[in-house]
Image (tube, rainbow, N blue to C red):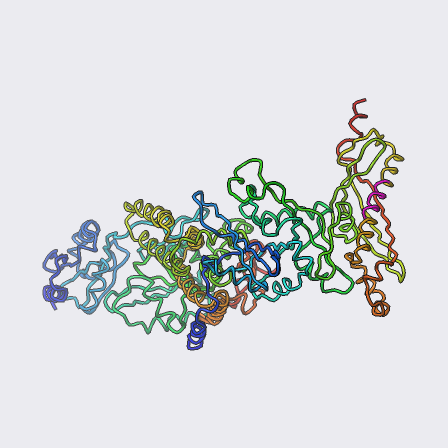
Amino acid sequence: MKKITLLFITILLTGCWNYQELNEYAIVTGMAIDWKKDHYEVSFLIANGNKSEDNSTKTSLLTGEGETIYEAIKDISLISPKELYISHLSIVIFSEDVASRGISSVLDFLLRDPQSHQNFYLLLAKDKPAKDVLSILSPLSDYTSQNITSNLINSYKLQAKISDASFNLFMEKYLQPGFEPVMNSITILGDIKEGQTSDSQEKSKQDAYTKLSTIALFKNDQFLGFATEDESIGISLILGEVDTFYFNVPCDDGTVVSVSNNYKVDYEVEKNVLRVKAKSEGTMREVNCKINLEEEKEIQKLETKAEEVLRSYMVKAIQLAKSYQTDIFGFGLKYYQKFPNEFKQIKDWNEFFKNYLIEVEVDFQYTSKGTLEQSLEREKK
Amino acid sequence: MTNKERIEKIQKELGNSSDIVVRELNKKISYLFLESVSSDDKISNFLVKSIVEMENQEDIFHTIQNTLYNSHIVVLDKTSDCYYYLSSGYTCLFIDQEKKYLAIETKTKLDRGVTESTSEPSIRGPKDSFTENHAVNLGLIRKRIKDPKLRILETKIGRRTQSKVSLIYIEDIADQKRVETIQNSLKTIDIDGILDTGYLRDFLQSHEKSFFPKMISSERPDLACQGILNGKIVIMVENSPYVLIMPATLTDFFKSSEDYYQSYSSSNFSRILKVIAFFVTILTPAIYIALMTFNQEMIPDQLLISLATQRSEVPFPTFMEVTIFVILFEILREADIKSPSASGASMSIVGALILGDASVAAGIVSPIVVIVVAITSICELVFTDMDFINAIRQWRLLFILSTIFTGMIGILVASLILIIKLASLEPLNTPYLIPYSPLNLSAMEDSILLFPSNKRKNRPNYLTHNTRRVKKK
């Protein structure tokens, strides 16, 4: 009994360490970082704003300025009546300015802060200030940050144009030798000012909305440029980060939209050449030409064309990466794993990468034609 | 001593109570009884009628003793012996010039009949329950277990109430040492009166302090018999519809007598539900406080935001909100049990509307607290043993107390203390957490998980040495 009383007393002696009521927190779910002349401008999206009449919550965007990220955040806390709480941060958006200057100081803050949970996504605001992206209200979700994250998660699983860009993955690539990170970008369509009011949420056609855009290439912590859509697909394909994605295969007088599943990619590393071997199966989703789908030959023809299409995506991506001299595919890492001694002798991998021969092989097979056996026009006859 | 002297002495001793009835049948024979506990019918129809017929016999004392139409006749010697019998509904018959006298059973029926159990109702299973009548209670057990080895040891406890206390067990199953231990502790009881089995509780478990009950108290004869058949010892007290079944282990409170009447799969399902409910009801308010005030990072994004907005208008700290509401609910429950059923309706209006709805609308508590307390109390209702429920309530408050200061760590510490406390309990030399701690594989067939009845071949070996339930083939 004595021991138990002692044990209870030890609990009481701790006082209220780390005690904080939930409603005294301002829950930060989104963070946007812009560059203004000579200092950072950090904006926080606070999720638990005032309760509105219909019990839904209002988000609010608070902005602070400072020479360092931390200073800017402290500037925000001068505005906020509640303690800023960034454990539930789900999205961090950089403006192009910040990204081209290098984001290492931001990454350092996000890794070092004890509250930070490092479970969020990184995005680059294309052509627009990062702050504005967070301020666009979505009619489908009350929280902009949530809207963007779920948009991102659903997209990178189903489309090759978007890559998996969680903070952890970005950091992993950033810290490893012979691997450069990429980031997804986001842009705003429509009238930004209208999109910031809650009136816009009530319209069936929004005044402004955010849309995920192509992949942004980085070298170290610096943003270099955007890929086109085709190049973005190529990047995702080489990285092997996709499972299901769609692409168009040209046929005689139209296109066959195909959806690939079971996509797998393998790498064969040699000292002077690297072979990317992709293997995939697919189904047809839309057939716009008069091709006879019952003939084995025609299908095989189509498969060869599909392989060519996929291959061209990848080749384009490689050309882009080579032109920027940034190894976003992590070929350097693979080279290092196979030839560690040789890798050490290479002074600048990205320089070496520029002249490194990369071959692409694709093997594609149709496993199904969908629910129709023929193209519609042929079915009619 | 003449009849007159004797009767006067008794009347004087009883303070000339108004319910004493004395009648002189003739010069030789007179009788005395207490009309409050005796049946006039029996006395006039059997006693008086037959005695009048025998009046002219020579050795009247022995004739009456031997031929009276009554199954209970006691021959008494001292005058002081009669009070117990008089209070029990006996009629004392005095015969002049005889040193001894007779006490003849003429009880009136003061008990309700065997009715359905109200506190432990069953859907599938026997409906009868113990009553206030000791003989009936014994009968309810005797008719279920027709084994000649069934032992009923009776003692009288209580200086003034002189209540019968019976120990019931099967001689070749129950552990004799346990029977002796219980008998010894019963012997040491020196008390004015025992009105219910509850009076015995503290005497039987005095040396081990714990909120958790070390005996099952039940009004179901089938549960008592299940215990007896497994080697447990049942204690029955006169005038109490509840019996004590000893010793109890923690798993016993997750079982119900109905488990053995249903298919084993559905019993297992309900037992697992009870285990979940046990943890939910003890931990939920504490976990809620810990999450809300210390470990917010453990709550998923969307829930966190909704919790934060719900709480934004509540002026009190979370722990106060929860504690107030938990205690209010306990009071409501207490009031509901004690109040007559006529006022039950107003109670539910007060409970549901005012406590639940209005307090949220007034911004005194957040809606989620109402849900937390509701979940907690619903899970509590799964258990039928009041002592077990009380233990859960008390531990719940301890858990809340320790989380107020340290959050999740407090829950961890309190859980450790709970486990240590439970593991160190040994009612009647039975580890409380058996068969899990210490691990006892042979007793697993009826622990939390129940094996099908044709596979259950052993009695729990921590209760008895005679473990084989069925013959070996």
Q: How many labels does the image show?
A: 0
Magenta residue span:
A305-313
Give x and y (percent) for residue B244.
Answer: 38, 62
Give x and y (percent) for residue A105.
Answer: 64, 64
Q: Nearer the viewer, residue B107 or B285?
A: B285
Image quadrant assignment for residue B65: bottom left
Image quadrant assignment for residue B193: bottom left
Q: Nearer the viewer, residue B137 or B142?
A: B137
Which quadrant is home to the C terminus of chain B? bottom right
Apparent side of residue B301 relative to residue B197 in the rendered image (left or right) = right
Q: Nearer the viewer, residue B95 or B56?
A: B95
Apparent side of residue B452 relative to residue B34 in the rendered image (left or right) = right
Magenta residue check for A308: yes
Prevailing secondary structure of the magenta residues? helix
Magenta residue check for A340: no
Give x and y (percent) for residue B203.
Answer: 35, 70
Which quadrant is home to the N terminus of chain B? bottom left
Q: Residue furthest front?
A: A37
Q: Which residue corresponds to the image point at 43% horizontal and 76% vertical from the top-left? A: A6
Residue A104 seen:
yes
Give x and y (percent) for residue A211.
Answer: 65, 44
Q: In this view, does B405 lie above or below A45?
A: below
Residue B283 seen:
no
